[in-house]
Every structure is written in C-alpha cells, then in structure tokens.
Image (spheres, rainbow, N blue to C red):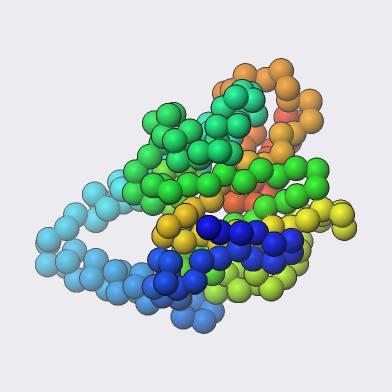
Amino acid sequence: MTHAHPDDHSHDGPEHGHHHGGPGGSGLSANELRVRALQSLLTEKGYIDPGALDEIVETYETRVGPRNGARVVARAWADPAYREWLLRDATGAIASLGYMGRQGEHMTAVENTDSVHNLVVCTLCSCYPWPVLGLPPVWYKSAPYRSRAVRDPRGVLADFGIALPAGVQVRVWDSTAEMRYLVIPRQPPGTAGLSEDQLAALVTRDSMIGTGQPRSPEGSTRP
C-alpha cells in the first residue's frame, strides 16, 4: 500500500512497476526516444500512417483527456454519495462514468481540503492516468519536475503559482504502474448551485495533478 507523508513523497520502489527514468534534463525518456526513431523509420517505409497516429494523439489530448477527469470531479462536487465512492473506490467510480482503459486500470482519488494539498508525480518515468487526464504534459515527464516535486514540493507549487499557507500540509503521491492518482481539487467558492456541466468547465488539468487550481466562475487559471 502506498502511504503519504506531509511535505514528503509517497512511492512504490522500482520493483513495483517503474522500469526506467528519462535522461537528465530531457523531457523524453530513453524508451520515448527509441519509439520516435522507430516511428520515423516505419513511416519512411510506408508501414504506418502519420495521420492515424496524429488522430490517436488528438483523441487522448482532447476527447479522452482532461475533459473526462473534469466530469469526474464535477460529479464529486455535485454528488456527495459519488464523492464518497470516488474516494473509496476510484477505479469503480470512474468506470461508472464510462472512463476506463489502458493506463487507468488502478486509480486512487485524493482530495484537497483546507488543511491538505495533494501533488502527483511519477519519480522514475511518467505513469499517468490517460483515460481521465489524456497525455501527460511535457513538464510532468521532465527530470526537474520528477526530482523537485519530491525534494521541494512547496517550491514546485510556487513555480506553478500556488502559495499555500504554512499550516497546509503537502502530500506528494508517486504514481506507478500499479496505482495512478487523481486529485479532487477544492470546489471554488460560490459554485454550489452550478450544474455539472458548469462545474466541469471550471476544472483544469493541472488542478487534477495538484499543480493548479480550478477556475473561478469569473476568471481562469492555468490549463
């Protein structure tokens, strides 16, 4: 079982699903570099259609991406029973909305509160819940983020524009092949009467990782 510690990181070791890390300072892992080289070779020989690959990427970035997670969070904000289910059995609760599949088989939801802020990282590669968040952003896969999120989570949050009061505990969750995490951000004030569609429009990708906040009804935050 994975445990969280205040201003520390929660992790399973390499024996629990991590197999490699990216080269220092690069946003691409060794495997990703090999995949790109193989893709170029197969495209050149006519074995694959770049257009089809672009369609797959577009699907995960937009249609299968953060909008799905936003729906999950909006339901949790609007429905206390669903929120309890999500916190108890995230995999089942998320699947009930039709969001399941590769990279989303084992999910845990963690909730931001007045006293706790959650941050998700994958320290050794880039494990990420594709069905609810789409493809991971480049910074999530970068070596600086993967290392600093563990050593200096408050500094990382400050870089993303989040300044937490001293009394708020930061919990860092290390995503692995066995478990991926979804942050339930705090619901913005004054939104209790909004519909789920309206609530979902306030949820940002970064807020579901922990590096951002939801939009307010009057404005917006990081994507």
Would residue 211 appear left or right of 71 to someone viewing this image?
right
Image height of 125 relative to 98, above or below: below
Image height of 97 relative to 167, above or below: above
Report the residue that reaches farthest toward the front.
1
Q: Position of residue 133 (x, y in %)?
A: 49, 46
* Image point (73%, 51%), residue name: 117
Number of numbered callouts drawn: 0
Q: Position of residue 113 (x, y in %)?
A: 75, 42
Image height of 108 relative to 198, above or below: below
Closer to us: 7 or 148 = 7
Report the residue that reaches farthest toward the right.
166
Closer to us: 191 or 54 = 191
Would residue 218 appear left or right of 17 to someone viewing this image?
right
* Image point (50%, 38%), residue name: 89
Closer to us: 83 or 139 = 83
Q: Position of residue 31 (x, y in %)?
A: 34, 73
* Image point (12%, 62%), residue name: 46
Regarding residue 166, the answer to whether it shows in the image is yes
Would residue 221 appear left or right of 40 to someone viewing this image?
right
Regarding residue 70, the answer to whether it shows in the image is no
Q: Position of residue 13 (x, y in %)?
A: 49, 71
User: In which quadrant of the rendered view does residue 14 lie?
Assistant: bottom left
* Image point (74%, 64%), residue name: 7
